[in-house]
Image (tube, helix red, strand yellow):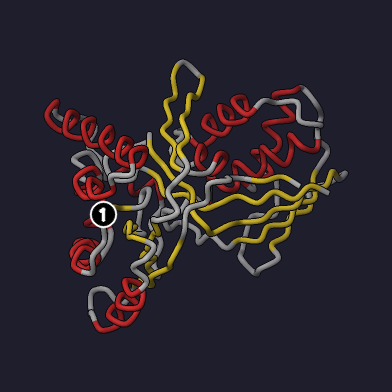
Amino acid sequence: MITVTVPATSANVGAGFDALGLALSMHNTFTFEECDHIDITSVDGTRVPAGNNNLVYRSARAVYDQLGIPLPGLRITQKNDIPMARGLGSSSACIVAGILGANALLGGRLTRRQMLTLATAIEGHPDNVAPAMRGGFVTSVYDEGQVYTVKKDIDEALAFAAFVPDFPLLTAKARAALPQMVSHKDAVYNLSRAALATAAFCDGDYELLGVATKDALHQSYRLPLIPGGDELFDFALDLGALAVYISGAGPTIMAVVRRSDKSFFERAAAALPQHETLKAFTVHRLLADNTGATVQ
């Protein structure tokens, strides 16, 4: 039996649309066994597809197909700690798990780049699957069918406040809200800030993150889909967050804070229920996962 553990991820990190992402200390766990039929169960009560449309199974099957090996079936169990449709990479965790699990069952025939490229082909962009697989803070480029990444371990001095609402936001709906064309000015605005965010994480100059995570390409279009989102940005900054951004497609709002500022989480948890527009959110204290997905 193969066990795969995959971290949650937070994509875009503000300005790095479809390019930047980081891995966090919340995980889904999957087990794989070859079987003569499809047998998929959730061990935590989360409802998951039990047939060949299950994303974990489809991703595993893609490995077998790429290698030209028949797949009669698989026995898969899922433990889903990452909330679904909340912008924390639950679908990417399934994709990465399926690929890593299948590759392990087949003796590790695919390289990491091949697996990451396959995961990106399934997901459509690398900003979640790359940090899910590699851990840490990852910059990714998808070029001519290949994925190129650079990983930087995230400083243990940082923590992350995930403000997770009690309502979902499907990625398809969040992407549909985006304009088909953007101005040259907005493109330059984001390019410069994505570069600054990368440099800030690499250099340890975290005071720059407040500016580096500002965005002109997607957040203003998605915030109207997140009731209370605008207020939560101000709320987190007033509590002392270094930076605030929409995690992935949302609706989770992510704040970067100093790990030593433990009172941030206490004050946030106490204040959220008192705000009529923010009481739908729950704050989760997360740390970086610099390891990424593991296979045992």
Q: Nearer the viewer, residue 150 or 38?
A: 150
Residue 106 left/right relative to 252: right
Residue at position x 41%, y 53% in the image: 87
From this view, report whether residue 67 is shown above or below residue 27: above
Q: Quadrant of residue 143?
A: top left
The reply to whether residue 53 is visible in this rendering is: no
Q: Quadrant of residue 46?
A: bottom right
Q: How many numbered discs?
A: 1
Residue 186 left/right relative to 16: left
From this view, report whether residue 283 is shown above or below residue 195: below
Residue corresponding to mark 1: 243
* Mark 1 crowdedness (10 Å alpha carbons): few <14, some 14-19, many ≥20: many
Q: Nearer the viewer, residue 166 or 140?
A: 140
From this view, report whether residue 41 is shown above or below residue 32: below
Residue at position x 71%, y 45% in the image: 295
From this view, report whether residue 12 is shown above or below residue 79: above
Q: Residue at the left extreme?
A: 185
Q: Nearer the viewer, residue 68 or 197?
A: 197
Q: Position of residue 122 (x, y in %)?
A: 54, 34
Q: Position of residue 64 (x, y in %)?
A: 74, 30
Residue 144 left/right relative to 41: left
Indicate the secondary structure of the residue bearing disc 1. Answer: strand
Residue at position x 77%, y 22% in the image: 68
The reply to whether residue 8 is visible in this rendering is: yes
Q: Amino acid at mark 1?
A: Ala
Q: Quadrant of residue 166?
A: bottom left
Q: Position of residue 190 (x, y in %)?
A: 22, 34
